[in-house]
Amino acid sequence: MSKFYSLFSSSKGNASFLGDPQGGILIDAGVSCRKLKNALKNHRIPDEAVKAICITHSHSDHIAGLRVFLAKHPVPVYATRQTLQEIAGTMALSEEAQLREIIPGKTVHMAEIAVTAFPTMHDAPGSCGYGFVMPDGETCAVCTDLGCVTPEVQAALFGADLVLLEANYDPEMLRYGSYPWALQERIRGTFGHLSNQESAAFAASLITHGTTRLILGHLSENNNTMPLAGKTVEQYLRGQGICRNRDYLMEVSAPAGLQQAVIF
């Protein structure tokens, strides 16, 4: 029985934990070390359970707490070569920091979990998502910060039991909100983020290919709401003849993910 904990998920900070109190992997560290440690503690996960950290890309909402966390808990950090270069260039990491390149498409093992990175379209060098195969054979994936869904993303996610999938913004809220036009264009562009509608369309493909559990994440705090993201995706799927609690289970991750771990 595998567990996925969405600790933080929003445009302000992201971090997830995959595993159990005996050991697992932290995916991203986009909030302060104190917040990370408190979130783990709230789920009764000791800091020592973090055996490795996988970083999706170098934007601050994914690495903000990395330096301090590593100073207290020096564990290996995995990311693509470009992301490691960005991190090393912007963070004053210790010389003892264990930075390890992960090559998309090649599987590595950490905390008894098989991990495979896949490239994503986002405006950060070396941006990637991750697929995981647990010791019991269950599979899951983390896939946020997508400008668009590429064939590589589809190939990596199809068949995953659980997927943390981006549903970043509602087009109307973005269009009529406070963001300047240039920022709006970046968000909805090829290297930006997925809208609720785009997330819904991809979710339908995922479920058709075997996904049974969805977590909607990386919601914009200014251009989306949890009820709106969930409603948009559920209504689209229902229109495709795919029914919640029959064909799939779904949660919408809160900015400071207070929900219980998802078992898959």
Image (cartoon, helix red, strand yellow):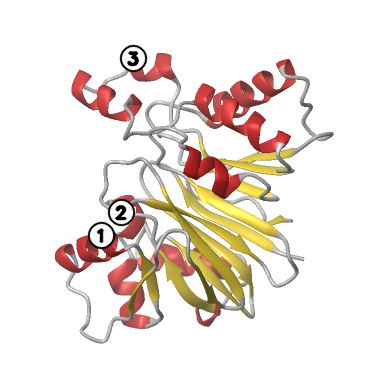
| Image depth: mark 3 or mark 2 in front | 2
Binning the other alpha carbons within 10 Å of mark 1 as few (below 14), some (14 to 19) or many (20 upward) gives some
Secondary structure of the residue carrying numbered label 3: helix
Which residue is denoted by mark 1 in the rendering? 82
**Residue 231 point in image, percent of width and height:** 63, 23
Q: How many marks?
A: 3
**Residue 1 point in image, percent of width and height:** 77, 66
| Earlier residue among tags 1 and 2 | 1
Which residue is denoted by mark 2 in the rendering? 126
Report the front residue among 202 and 219: 202
**Side of 59 relative to 237 (left or right):** left
**Structural distance between the alpha carbons of marks 3 and 1:** 32 Å
Give the answer, above or below, for where 30 lies relative to 174: below
For the residues bearing labels 1 and 2, Cβ distance under 8 angstroms: yes
Secondary structure of the residue carrying numbered label 2: loop
Residue type, numbered disc 1:
Gln
| Earlier residue among tags 3 and 1 | 1
Residue type, numbered disc 3:
Arg
Which residue is denoted by mark 3 in the rendering? 175
Report the front residue among 214 and 38: 214
For the residues bearing labels 3 and 1, Cβ distance under 8 angstroms: no
Give the answer, above or below, for where 58 lies relative to 43: above
Q: Quadrant of residue 178?
A: top left
